[in-house]
Amino acid sequence: MQKQENVLTYTVTFEPDPGGGFVAFVPILPGCMSQGENFEEARDNIKDAIAGYLAVLKEDGDRIPVESPDRVSAI
């Protein structure tokens, strides 16, 4: 029997950085942010940041935040 994996979706906000590139943050995960020299790099980096953030929550036995499906939109 295969283990079923839950897939969580989070809203990510991207803002242009005045110094160049983009800053990305996840409103429902306080302090979870990253950046990149371009949009694609910022997107990849925030995915890694989210994974790390959730891993720490899991290790610490803390609740994993779940967004309401009606608040999620995709690009």
Image: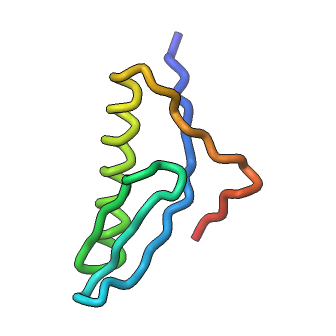
Q: From this viewpoint, which residue is outermost toward the right?
A: 70
For residue 47, above or below residue 61:
below
Q: Which of 12 and 7 is in front in this view?
A: 12
Q: From this viewpoint, which residue is outermost toward the front?
A: 30
Q: Nearer the viewer, residue 63 or 51?
A: 63
**Horizontal placement of 13 versus 40: left or right?**
right
Looking at the picture, how far across and down is residue 39, in whole percent? 36, 77
For residue 59, above or below residue 31:
above
Question: At 66% from the left edge and 63% from the top edge, which residue is drawn?
Answer: 73
For residue 60, above or below residue 23:
above
Question: At 47% from the left edge and 49% from the top edge, which residue is drawn?
Answer: 29
Looking at the picture, how far across and down is residue 65, in whole percent? 55, 38
Looking at the picture, how far across and down is residue 7, in whole percent? 55, 38
**Horizontal placement of 69 versus 4: left or right?**
right
Q: Would you identify the image quadrant in which residue 16 lies? A: bottom left
Question: At 40% from the left edge and 37% from the top edge, which residue is drawn?
Answer: 54
Looking at the picture, how far across and down is residue 2, in whole percent? 50, 16
Q: Would you identify the image quadrant in which residue 53 lies? A: top left
Q: How many labels does the image show?
A: 0
Q: Would you identify the image quadrant in which residue 33 lies? A: bottom left
Q: From this viewpoint, which residue is outermost toward the top?
A: 1
**Horizontal placement of 72 versus 37: left or right?**
right
Question: At 38% from the left edge and 53% from the top edge, which residue is drawn?
Answer: 32
**Colour convention:** rainbow
Name the image quarter holding the C terminus.
bottom right
